[in-house]
Amino acid sequence: MCIFDLIEELKLSLRDDKEVMERILTQIKPDCLLVKSGDRKLNAQEFVVLKVAFRVSKLGKDPTWIFEKIDYDKSGTLSPQEILQGCRSVLGVYFSTEEANLFTQYLDEDGSGDVDLEEFTDKVSLDNL
């Protein structure tokens, strides 16, 4: 069982208590996770990316579909807040505001502070990791 399967089990177990679920799931950090190829620990940014990419893959949804669902203001770009809210409500991925900012930085290739569709779809896939 990988950490992501464990996260799925926690979400099922705690589905009736959203507050407890969110508190637990936002506290899962990469400190104890080791990359298969050695003893290098995942950094926080890698962990956030893996959480989101794993969930997108598990849902079987196209990254464009996910982008459109979490672009709440329909601006064509995602702010860190939209990413945080969208990952929670659409993907069921819980992470902290700090992790949302790390994820935005990873996705935001042009440094604009927001993530456009191309940036999002290029990186939110297990195939692209």
Image (spheres, helix red, strand yellow):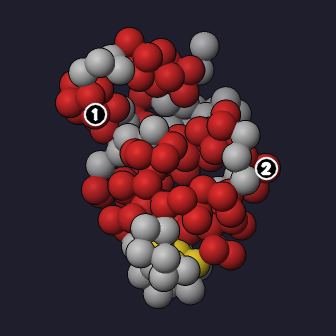
In the rendered image, the residue lying farthest to the right is 127
| Closer to the camera in the image, 68 or 126 | 68
Residue at (41, 46) in percent of width and height: 89
Q: Which label was assigned to residue 120?
A: none
Q: Position of residue 69 (x, y in %)?
A: 54, 59
Residue type (three-letter) at the residue carrying disc 1: Glu
Residue 22, numbered circle: 1
Q: What amino acid is at disc 2? A: Asp
Q: Can residue 122 be seen in this view?
A: yes
Residue 127 marker: 2
Relative height, residue 31 to residue 124 (above, below): above
Q: How far apart are marks 1 and 2 (CA)?
A: 28 Å
Which is nearer the N-term, disc 1 or disc 2? 1
Left-right relation of 10 to 46 = left
Q: What kind of element bears circle 1?
A: helix
**Residue 120 left/right relative to 25:** right
Determine the secondary structure under disc 2: helix
Task: Give me the residue at 73% from left, 53% from top.
Answer: 62
**Mark 1 surroundings within 10 Å by alpha-carbon count, few (fewer than 14), some (14 through 19), many (20 or more):** some
Report the side of 112 relative to 98 (left or right).
right
On the question of residue 47 being in view, the answer is no
Q: Quadrant location of residue 121?
A: bottom right
Q: Residue at x 45, y 41 (%)?
A: 93
Asked if the residue under mark 2 is in contact with the one under mark 1, i.e. CB atoms within 8 Å, the reply is: no
